[in-house]
Image (cartoon, rainbow, N blue to C red):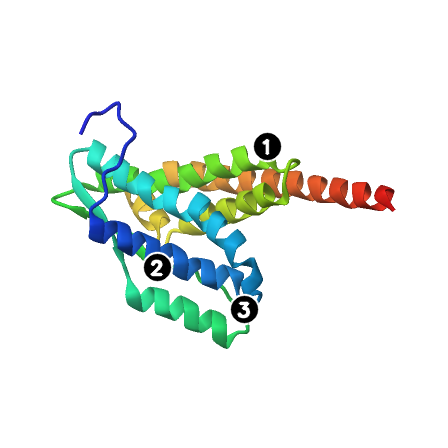
Amino acid sequence: MCAVSLAVELEKEEFIELVVAALGLSLVYAYPSLYSFPIALVTIAAAFVPHELAHRYLAEHLGFRSRFRLSTPSLVSSIMICLLSGGLVKVGTAGAVEVQGFASEDDMGEIALAGPLTNMLIAALSALFSPASPLFAIIAIVSAGMGVFNLLPVPPLDGHYVARWNRQNWALVFGLSLLVSALVSWSVVQDALGWLLWSWRGF
């Protein structure tokens, strides 16, 4: 695979598993208002899918074979927890990228870091466009939250591998993710107030 290429070639089965994971997580985020499923699907496509593909791309770039693998038990558990809680508890676990071959702690740390960093970038870019549409605000909030959550230093989350690789790097990136999340939230709140003011003036 060419180092300058950003393309990630997915096997047919892998693509299907990624789609199933995205659809399942979209159901979790949309419930109990299934009318919001299309919005949830776009949000998951913008936040979850690039997160996983970032792991996949960097693993391939470092010379490892890798693939996204759906975890049916995790996805079913996420859906059941959401349904039983009436949509109050949303656990977004559906699978992960498996790295084949011997990968050192350094390699695994770098590969793990790629996903949350991608979420931060997506959150920041989406926040810039949030004045144009509430959808960008939703993507920004979800992507920022996904980045922070995945950086928690507990297995099997990305933060576990990053902290095991280099605690200083983990602390720096985790702090950065909190800062990005706070700035994104503040930006979205300002935009929401602007929408309310615009609506009020419309009356």
**Which of marks 3 and 1 precedes in the sequence?**
3
Residue occupying the point 47% across, 53% down: 41
**Which of marks 2 and 3 precedes in the sequence?**
3
> What residue type is disc 3 on?
Gly
Asked if residue 98 can be seen in this view, the reply is no
- Under tag 3, what secondary structure? loop
Residue occupying the point 29% across, 37% down: 110
Q: Position of residue 139 (x, y in %)?
A: 53, 45
Relative to 93, does residue 108 appear above or below in the rendering?
A: above
- Residue of label 2: 94
Q: Position of residue 96 (x, y in %)?
A: 29, 53
Do the residues bearing badges 2 and 1 touch, measured as CB atoms within 8 Å?
Answer: no
- Residue of label 3: 87
Number of other residues with Cα within 10 Å of mark 1, as a class: few under 14, some 14 to 19, many 20 or more = some
Q: Quadrant of the N terminus?
A: top left
Q: Is residue 121 left or right of residue 184?
A: left
> What residue type is disc 2 on?
Ala
Which numbered tag is attached to residue 128? 1
Number of other residues with Cα within 10 Å of mark 2, as a class: few under 14, some 14 to 19, many 20 or more = many
- Under tag 2, what secondary structure? loop
Of all residues, the one furthest to the left in this rendering is 101
Relative to 23, does residue 80 appear above or below in the rendering?
A: below
Asked if residue 163 can be seen in this view, the reply is yes
Q: Nearer the viewer, residue 158 or 97?
A: 97
Residue occupying the point 49% across, 40% down: 177
Q: Nearer the viewer, residue 127 or 168?
A: 127
